[in-house]
Each structure stands twice: as C-alpha cells, then as structure tokens.
Amino acid sequence: MSANKEEINSLIESRYKHGFVTDIESDSLPPGLNEDVIRAISARKNEPKFMLDWRLKSYKHWLKLNEPNWAHVDYTPINYQDISYFSAPKSDADRPKSLAEVDPKLLETYDKLGIPLHERARLAGVAVDAVFDSVSIATTFKKKLSDAGVIFCPFSEAVTKHPELIKKYLGSVVPYRDNFFTALNSAVFSDGSFVYIPKGVRCPMELSTYFRINAANTGQFERTLIIADEGSHVSYLEGCTAPMRDENQLHAAVVELVALKDAEIKYSTVQNWYPGDEEGKGGIYNFVTKRGDCRGANSKISWTQVETGSAITWKYPSCILRGDNSIGEFYSVAVTNNRQQADTGTKMIHIGNNTKSTIVSKGISAGRAQNAYRGLVRVMPQANNARNHTQCDSLLIGGDCGAHTFPYIEAKNPSAIIEHEATTSKISEDQLFYCKQRGIEEEDAVNMIVNGFCKDVFKKLPMEFAVEAQALLNVSLEGAVG
Amino acid sequence: MLEIKNLHAKVGTTNILNGLSLTIKKGEVHAIMGPNGSGKSTLARIIAGDDSYDVTDGEIHYKNKNLMELSPEERSREGIFLGFQYPVEIPGLNNSQFLKAALNAKRKYLGIEEIDAFEFLKMARETIKRLEIDPSFLNRGVNEGFSGGERKRNEILQMTMLEPNIAILDETDSGLDIDALKVVAKGVNEFRNQDNAVILVTHYQRLLEYIKPDKVHVLSEGRIIRSGDESLAKELEKTGYIAEKESKK
Ligand SMILES: Nc1ncnc2c1ncn2[C@@H]1O[C@H](COP(=O)(O)OP(=O)(O)OP(=O)(O)O)[C@@H](O)[C@H]1O
Ligand SMILES: [Mg+2]
C-alpha cells in the first residue's frame, strides 16, 4: 500500500552497465546481401565447396520467405540490405595462438564486462571459446579436451578440419528451410562453436562461450553445433552481453544439438544483450532458433536459460524426443523491463515411446514490458506413454506490464499424460511495505522476491553461472532507490 | 518514547484520523479498542510509515525524533515493529532468508556486525521452540499458505527476533484458538520489559486477561474518546461501543 507507482517505476528502472564500445577497427563487408556477399564470406573463411553450396541453397530459399509476424512482439521492419554480413577484427591474418597474443584492448573489454577471461578460465577450469564479432579469437584448455578426444573449436575451423562431421550433422536438427531466420543464418552464418564428444566420454570440463556484438550495424549470425556421441555427456554454457548502441541490432543464431544413444547434453544460457533504453531504443533483436534432437534411446537434452536482455527476444529452445525413453527439459527465466518484449518458450515433440519432458518457465515483467510464454507439447501417434509436466509462472512488478501464456497441446496418442500448471503473481505494494516495515530496502526486497521466484531454474544452472545469473537479474531490475 | 499530537490523516478525500493524541512511555502496555473502521489500523500503519495516507496535521515524535522524517525502513531499524492485522503472503521468499535480511538490515544500521547463517539459525530455532512454532515455518515462503493463526504467530516470531523498542500488534489475537492465544500472550509477556513498550490493538477483553495493559483507549471516528485502566475494557465488553458513543453525545 505504501509505495506509489512512481516509486515502483523508479525502482525497476535499470541502466545497462556494459554500455561501451571498443574501438578496434573492423574489417567489414559493405552492407547488403546478395550471392556475391555469400561467396565473399565463404572465400574469406576458405570454406570447402560443399559449404558454399549449402549457403547458396539456403540463400535462394530465404529469398522466397517472409518474416514471421505471429509472435507477440512488435518492431519496425528490418532492412536486410542495411546490414553488413561480415566483420572481423583487423588482426585476422595472424590470429593469436594464446591469450597472451590477444589484443590487450580486447581483454580489457572482457574485463569491463566482468569476464576476466584468463582468471576465470584458470580458476574455474572452464574452457572458453570467445566470439568477438564474427571471428573466434581465444581458445583455451585445448589440450585437456583433445586428450579426452573432445573437439571444441570455432565453427569455421570445424568446417575445414572436420568436414565429415559437419556434412553429417549440420542442418540435421534445424534444416535451413525451417524458418525465415534459419534460412538467413544458414546463408550468411559467421562463426560460432563446434563441439563433438566421442563415444562414452564425459567431457572433463564445462564448456563455455561468451558472445558479444561490437561493430555497428553488423548482423550476428552464430552457428553452434554440439554432438554428443553414444554414452557421452557434456555441459555447455553460453553467455553474452553487448555494448550500448543506438541502432537496433539483429541477432539470428542457430544452435543444433544432437544426443545419440545414452548421451546427455546440458545447455545453459545466461543472456544479457543490451535491452535498449527506457523507450526501447537501441536494443538487440534476438531471433534465435535452438533445437535439440534426442536421436538415440535414453538420451537427454536439457535447456536452461536466463534471459535478461534484448529489446526483442524470439526464442524457443526445443527438444525432439525421437529415441525411446528420451528426456527433454526446459528451464527458463525471462526478465523484461521498460519497453522490452519477449516471446519465448519451448517445443517438446514426443516421437519415441516412454519419452518425458519437463517445462519450467518463469517470466518476470516490469515497467511497460510484455512477456509471453509460448509452448508446444506435441505427442505423435506412435509415441506411447509420453509424459509432460509444464509449470508456467509469471511475476508482474508494477501495473503497466503484461504477461501472456500460450500453451499449445497436441496429443495424438491416448496414453499421453500432459499436465499444465500456470500462475500469475504480482509484487504488490503491500508486500513491499511489509518488507520495508521489517527494515529491508525496497530494492533488496524485490531482489529477494525475484530470486525466490526463480530458484527452481537457478538451481539447474552450474554453480558459478547461478551466482552470475542472480547478479544479472538484480542488475536488470536495479533502480534509483538506495 | 512515543508521542502523538493532534494527528489528522486522510485517504483521498476521506478523513480517517481527526485529531488523535497519545503518549506512550517506556515499559508501558497500551490497549487500543474501538469499532470497526474507527482508524486503529490506519494509526498503526501511519506510525510504521505507510505513505498511502496523507498526514494533514499533527506530529509524531519517537525517541525525541520527528518520526515523519524517517522512511519505513529507518523506523523499523530504529525499533518500531508493526504486527500486521493481515500479514501478506510473499510466495517464493523464504521465511528464514527474510528474517535474516531484516535482522541484518537493523544490525548494519546500528553498526553491529551482521549475523552469519549459523548463528542466525541457532537463534531462530531457539525462538521457534520457545514460541511453540512448527520448525518447518522457517523453510516456507513468508506467510505462504499459512493459516490465519499461523500468520499471527509468525508476526510474534519476527517481533521476538527483531527486539523492537515499540511493538504495535494490530489484532494479533484475532482468529487465534485458545492455545495459540496463550502462545502469543506468552511471547508478548516475555518480550515486554522496562525499556520497551507495546500497543495492543484488539477487539477482545480476553487478550487483556493474559497481557495486563497499563492503559486502555477507545478510538472512535478517528480520535480517542476515552482512556482508562484495565476496567474500561471489561466495561466495554458488557456495554459495547454504541453505549460508549451515545454517552459522549
Ligand atoms: N487505503 C484506504 N483507502 C480508502 N479507505 C481506507 C483506506 N485505509 C483505510 N480506509 C478507511 O478508513 C477507515 C478506518 O480503517 P482502519 O482499517 O484504520 O479501521 P480499523 O479501526 O482498523 O477497523 P477494524 O477494526 O475493522 O480493523 C475505514 O472506513 C476504512 O475503510
Ligand atoms: Mg484494523
């Protein structure tokens, strides 16, 4: 009852802490998209012919498509001819072999972002494959991984060094013709990560990648492919943050996961793209296609994500539960503040027998933000004894924001058991006054309530990421109070 | 300790308090009674710093400070505790985390070293045992799924842990079964001492049989219309407020 509207508004207002631009000269292609641009991208990367052919096929298909407009988001149309499709740090020719050779400016940038790369890598035992703009620069712990037979390298390197794996798996989970953005990504993808875990191997460390966008007006089209061969296990962490920018920036990544028999992939994301200012100006457009294929029996794919950034997020990490007894999981926290819009969710496609899926989605809206959950649970006719449990909770902070839930359930096999629970709660002025009466600052109270609301998801994250995620959430909802 | 002079307050255009004065000294227990809607909770919330009420006139002094200049958090850390009439649920926020944050906010303000998790748990467990509260309370969300009586006990638990200088208990006895009432009364009696004060807002003389008040006030239409000792409560129990109001006319 105590805090009035303005107070709550100022409380949830947040400033983006990572708003700065590094002035490393970019070696970019001029804006625009046509076949020549695609040939130029492919040539710069010394790609084999099969790769170029695939890009061109994707491009031709993309030309026939229209942008999807069904998501619960609203933005000014993107002019794809205004985007530059390739940019690399100038020192591309002699790429650093180790961190010591990395441009100190770059390391400084990571530092500002709170990512002390070398320290973090050494202390936490995490192998880091950092993507700066479109080209991967630093890769550590290579030796330990290669001793285990794990391949963890920039995607472009995999294309030349492991073409047989690329040919076999690229596009096998997310075909280029899947949707507008996958076709675009397949045509112009810049770089990303490639992971292959051989049969029976438990990856000896968490794999982590940090992405960021830097050069102005540069589309980012990462491509990530992770293959867990039979009986293997891998945990992959992805995190990102971007400098403050005045133009909207498009980010259309594709992530494909393949889990073969008895394999397990855990994919965690803590995402912190620049969300734009209070009016939504300058934020990132994040249109991502992430999909995992539980191809073998008893395989498991688990998506965990904490989304706090982006002006617009359009993202549905999904699982295709093809193998018998396979398991798909989706744990998500999506925070939207100010003018942010998020349309996220998941798809669980049950094909094999005794397949199980769990969905836990926590949406937090503040300011004038809109947060939509869109989830599909589909049970195919041949899938006997499929199980799904969905828990979908929304938390509203203040009275001007919105939460929307769109669950789609298609059960074509009568043995399926599908449960859906949804709740909406609100941080009320009464709750805040109660906390304040006990001596707790409003901001701390909001953080505690929000963290409590998200704990089911946070506890699925690897330890060091959980701490970071919590901090990130607090920053996202930080205000002028205190 | 607390001095309220000629307090006027309203919400929107509705006047709720109309010149209320009240003085409470260290070591005293005051009971405030009065019909529904007379302004008892409003008074309690204004003392605690709820700014949804407009204070249009009057003063509140606490420990020789102008209370109106302090934020609700500061008032709390200065030792003002309000046991709410309707304690709100905060789902997902763990009770012990909440209590520890409250305790440490106060300690920090007073320049005392913050309590660590171990020490806190020890203290919380002892208090819980003393108040005959189920230990599972600590691990649940703040008032989440608590029954009316459990919420009231939780208020007493918080009061006991936070050791305020003045505790305002707004109908903490309402909705309690007889055993719970005894537990609450025991909590209050163990709490009271020569250096603190208690304001009991209640509708029932029953509570006052367990907690002996030094003064009893009758609040009606936003002002105190009568003050007396314990016997006033007994009298009201028989005659009701109507007679009280009539006799004033
Ligand atoms: N926020 C508010 N907005 C509008 N009216 C209010 C508000 N708070 C209190 N009132 C009104 O002020 C009057 C006093 O309310 P208050 O809650 O202080 O009464 P009370 O004495 O505590 O009653 P009870 O014995 O029923 O608890 C009531 O008429 C109530 O409707
Ligand atoms: Mg009341």
Image (cartoon, coloured by chain):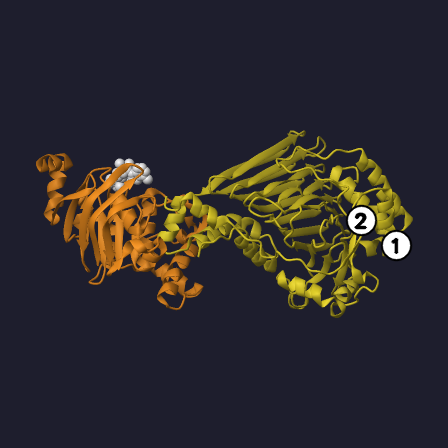
Chain colours: A yellow, B orange
Residue A289's spot in the image, x, y percent? Answer: 71, 43
Say which quarter of the image contains residue A344.
top right
- Residue toward you, A26 or A288: A26
Residue B216's spot in the image, x, y percent? Answer: 15, 48
Say which quarter of the image contains residue A315.
top right
Label 1 neighbourhood size at 10 Å, few (<14), some (14-19), many (20+)? some
Q: Which residue is mark 1?
A: A46
Does mark 1 have its CB less than 8 Å from ligand 1? Answer: no
Does mark 2 have its CB less than 8 Å from ligand 1? Answer: no
Q: Which residue is mark 2?
A: A30
User: Which chain is indicated by disc 1?
Assistant: A
Residue A478 visible in the picture: yes
Residue A263's spot in the image, x, y percent? Answer: 73, 50
Q: CA distance from mark 2 to mark 1?
A: 20 Å
Which label sits in the foreground, 2 or 1? 2
Q: Callout 2: helix, strand or loop?
A: loop
Looking at the image, tell me whether mark 2 or mark 1 is earlier in sequence order: 2
Q: Residue type at mark 1: give it.
A: Asn
| Relative horizontal placement of residue A55, taking residue B86 as reference (left or right) | right
User: Which quadrant is the C terminus of chain B positioned in?
Assistant: top left
- Residue toward you, B85 or B120: B85
Is residue A393 depicted above or below B107 in this figure? above
Name the residue at 19% across, 55% down.
Answer: B24
Name the residue at 23% across, 42% down.
Answer: B17
Name the outermost residue toward the bottom: A100
Residue B171's spot in the image, x, y percent? Answer: 26, 45
